[in-house]
């Protein structure tokens, strides 16, 4: 039986202990302390900076053990994870030490307790590499603590620790089931599975195996059995995410779980070629997911920590976010390495909902060392992660981390941490693909603005139209958050104008990673004029994000099968940002950009490849019309292409009886017309179609050239 304890927290600063305060498990002890001393809402203004004063402190969780023990039952202290380096003490005697936050532990304390006992979890200060730049993510480059906590362009610097996962006292009988893990293999036709269970228990256990409809398919010792005519697990849009159920039980103990049968491989992209000439070198990295023998276009997003306080994330939050992905027609999340691992509930939900998971380890944008101390911690943490996730049908890809092969990280495929991670993936989960980092040869990260000065002031329609990547695994267009959200984070004296005021900067509107990001006021001035209220800037940025992301996703789909993936940066955010690239605002509120992405990712739709976003009178407007289809059936449809200018509809094309084979795109005809001198702010290209395949694009229209240009831009 489980007994949850009542915990108190203690701050130890310069050797001095604070007063005791109430600490919650799961949770983060800095939050509990901040609440106790009155730091205020961490989201508001600059309140989260108050936590910087706690960075070099130690902490203690303390409880007087409370439980009921019957007869010869043993007593265990169980934790799903503590962040980050810590000791466990019973009555001031150290019984366990560990560095890392992802490995669970269970300690038999039966012979250590007296009936009146104090349990303490002592947490050391956050790891900071000696010599690293103060306040920089480099401080995390010799540890396995996720570097996002050290500050990113969408996450404030907020170093947290604590008992972020469940912890409890558990009494156990002699026939307690310590382990029960199923494994399986599929025949070549993938219609028969051989299943076996690895069970650790002092007495015999009975295995019951059921289909999703609760029909009993097997009952026995579970050592090995075969199932005929099985149903496979499929990702969203490709079939049912079918999950079988199992129980393992004896007279007094019972465990249960689910199991999805699937086979996944990572293949070379169709249309990529070996390098020409001699000597031969590397070809673009294989990056097409084959699920159950079917090549899948990966359409999804980058998932980050849903809260700045990781201990507060619960099943409800995960389910809200995963449901939004399912409803947006996505089939995959990339769990970005800087934020790394989620709680187990997240993966259960992805199994159930059919969202594939590309799981990265906790390396991002740093050069991680080859020294034995770091490698030892990495091995322990990574092995625990793989063992915890390897039976989740949703986990289809492992990756060493984010952007490790570049100038600011400087790692390579000879770096020992990445070689170690590859060996661990092979040892513990060899049938799930592994890549060392993203991006690899052929893949693309970026861009992250609608109009990019580094791309000769081209917009995203132009940039991605001319791109030719095997996968676009990070790209984004920012928008300013809603005015209602701004009122929750920006003081009233600063909210009337987007400036370099501290609260605007802290919440990533100004100087997040470039001086003008993420509000991108220079871009808004370029398109909409130098003057504008905050409310007007919000609407303008939402327009750009919606049309920009829609254009990128549809362009990536048009490039299938050479291009195999489109995942925007990013899906969610950990706190209320003033401006960000996310399409879901904190905590789980979809932006207008989310709905644009949802429409762009429908299984089948008519799509227009448009040369650029802004148009003027006298321009020769052109667009290519396509039928996109990543469904598993041939589709048919007709479309009428109309250009709406003011209140006038200009018919451009009728495409009758368009067809596209399963998971295939069809290019139709192009349209063109000369734009008239009409005093309107926008024009809309309408693809009027049946069967839910309609589409439309709202484009900027100017009768005359604008008189304002960003610095360095020639008009």
Image (cartoon, grey):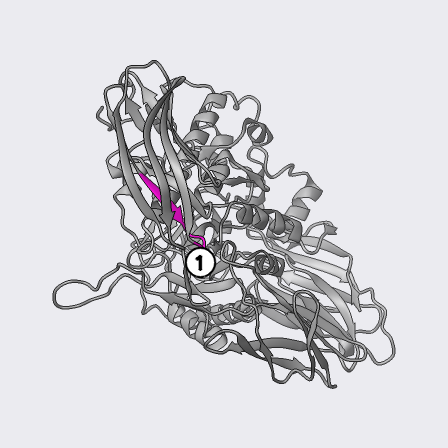
Q: Is residue 626 magenta?
A: yes
**Where does the magenta region start and end?**
625-633
| Residue at (41% x, 68% y) in the render | 265
Q: Residue furthest right?
A: 71
Quadrant in the picture for the N terminus: bottom right
| Residue at (48% x, 31% y) in the render | 504
Q: Is residue 436 magenta?
A: no
Q: Is residue 337 left or right of residue 102?
A: left
Q: Is residue 95 left or right of residue 675?
A: right
Q: Give the total number of marks visible in the rendering.
A: 1
- Picture layout, residue 293 above or below residue 485: below
| Residue at (37% x, 64% y) in the render | 436
Q: Residue 500, how many percent across, how many down?
A: 44, 28
Looking at the picture, tell me which residue is in the foreground, 99 or 353: 353
Residue denoted by label 1: 129
Q: Residue 66, located in which quarter of the rendered image?
A: bottom right
Q: Residue 399, how many percent across, how many down?
A: 42, 63
Q: Residue furthest left?
A: 278
Residue 475 visible in the shown view: no
- Picture layout, residue 153 above or below residue 663: above
Q: Residue furthest front?
A: 657
Residue 391 visible in the shown view: yes
Looking at the picture, tell me which residue is in the foreground, 543 or 25: 543
Looking at the picture, tell me which residue is in the foreground, 81 or 275: 275
Quadrant in the picture for the C terminus: top left
Q: Is residue 304 left or right of residue 201?
A: left
Q: Residue 209, located in which quarter of the rendered image?
A: bottom right
Q: Residue 694, how many percent across, how many down?
A: 44, 37
- Picture layout, residue 17 above or below residue 379: above
């Amino acid at each position: 039986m489980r007994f949850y304890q009542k915990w108190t927290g203690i701050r130890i600063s310069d050797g001095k202990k604070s007063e005791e305060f109430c600490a919650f498990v799961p949770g983060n002890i800095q939050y509990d302390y901040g609440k106790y001393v009155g730091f205020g809402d961490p989201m508001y203004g600059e309140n989260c900076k108050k936590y910087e004063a706690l960075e070099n402190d130690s902490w203690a969780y303390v409880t007087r053990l409370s439980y009921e023990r019957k007869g010869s039952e043993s007593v265990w202290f169980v934790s799903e994870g503590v962040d980050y380096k810590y000791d466990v003490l019973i009555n001031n005697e150290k019984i366990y030490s560990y560095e890392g936050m992802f490995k669970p532990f269970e300690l038999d304390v039966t012979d250590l307790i007296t009936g009146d006992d104090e349990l303490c979890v002592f947490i050391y200060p956050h790891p900071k590499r000696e010599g690293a730049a103060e306040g920089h993510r480099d401080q995390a480059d010799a540890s396995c603590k996720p570097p996002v906590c050290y500050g990113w362009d969408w996450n404030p610097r907020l170093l947290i620790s604590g008992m972020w996962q469940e912890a409890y006292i558990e009494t156990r009988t002699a026939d307690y089931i310590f382990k029960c893990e199923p494994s399986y293999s599929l025949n070549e036709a993938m219609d028969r599975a051989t299943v076996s269970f690895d069970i650790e228990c002092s007495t015999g256990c009975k295995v019951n195996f059921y289909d999703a409809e609760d029909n009993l398919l097997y009952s026995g010792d579970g050592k090995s059995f075969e199932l005929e005519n099985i149903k496979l697990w499929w990702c969203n849009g490709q079939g049912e995410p079918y999950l079988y159920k199992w129980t393992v039980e004896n007279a007094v103990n019972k465990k249960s779980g689910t199991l999805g049968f699937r086979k996944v491989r990572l293949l070379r992209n169709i249309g990529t070629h070996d390098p020409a000439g001699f000597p031969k070198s590397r070809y673009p990295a294989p990056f097409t997911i084959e699920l159950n023998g079917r090549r899948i276009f990966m359409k999804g997003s980058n998932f980050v920590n849903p809260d700045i306080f990781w201990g507060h994330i619960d099943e409800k939050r995960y389910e809200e976010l995963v449901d939004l992905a399912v409803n947006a027609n996505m089939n995959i999340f990339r769990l970005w390495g800087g934020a790394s691992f989620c709680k187990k509930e997240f993966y259960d939900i992805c199994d159930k909902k059919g969202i594939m998971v590309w799981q990265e380890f906790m390396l991002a944008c740093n050069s991680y060392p080859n020294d034995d101390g770091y490698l030892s911690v990495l091995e322990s943490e990574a092995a625990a992660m793989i063992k915890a996730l390897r039976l989740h049908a949703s986990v289809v890809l492992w990756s060493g981390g984010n952007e490790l092969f570049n100038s600011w990280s400087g790692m390579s495929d000879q770096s020992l941490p990445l070689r170690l991670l590859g060996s661990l993936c092979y040892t513990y989960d060899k049938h799930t693909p592994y890549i060392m980092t993203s991006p690899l040869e052929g893949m693309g990260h970026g861009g992250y603005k609608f109009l990019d000065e580094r791309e000769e002031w081209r917009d995203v329609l132009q940039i991605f139209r001319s791109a030719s990547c095997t996968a676009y695994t990070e790209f984004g267009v920012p928008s300013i958050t809603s005015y209602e959200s701004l009122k929750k984070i920006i003081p009233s004296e600063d909210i009337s104008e987007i400036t370099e005021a501290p609260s605007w900067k802290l919440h990533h509107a100004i100087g997040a990673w470039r001086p003008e990001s993420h509000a991108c006021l220079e871009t808004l001035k370029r398109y909409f004029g130098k003057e504008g209220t905050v409310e007007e800037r919000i609407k303008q940025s939402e327009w750009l994000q919606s049309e920009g992301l829609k254009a990128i996703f549809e362009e990536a789909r048009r490039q299938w099968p050479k291009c195999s993936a489109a995942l925007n940066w990013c899906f969610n955010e950990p706190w209320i940002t003033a401006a960000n690239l996310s399409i879901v605002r904190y905590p789980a509120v979809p932006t207008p950009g989310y709905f644009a992405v949802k429409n762009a990712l429908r299984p089948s739709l008519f799509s227009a490849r448009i040369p650029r976003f802004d148009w003027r009178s006298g321009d020769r407007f052109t667009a290519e019309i396509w039928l996109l289809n990543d469904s598993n059936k041939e589709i048919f449809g007709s479309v009428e292409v109309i250009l709406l200018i003011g209140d006038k509809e200009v018919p451009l094309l009728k495409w009758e009886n368009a067809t596209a084979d399963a998971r295939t795109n069809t290019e139709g005809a192009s349209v063109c017309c000369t734009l008239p001198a009409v005093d309107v702010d926008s024009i809309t290209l309408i693809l009027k179609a049946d069967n839910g395949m309609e589409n439309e694009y709202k484009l900027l229209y100017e009768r005359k050239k604008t008189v304002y240009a960003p610095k360095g831009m020639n008009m």
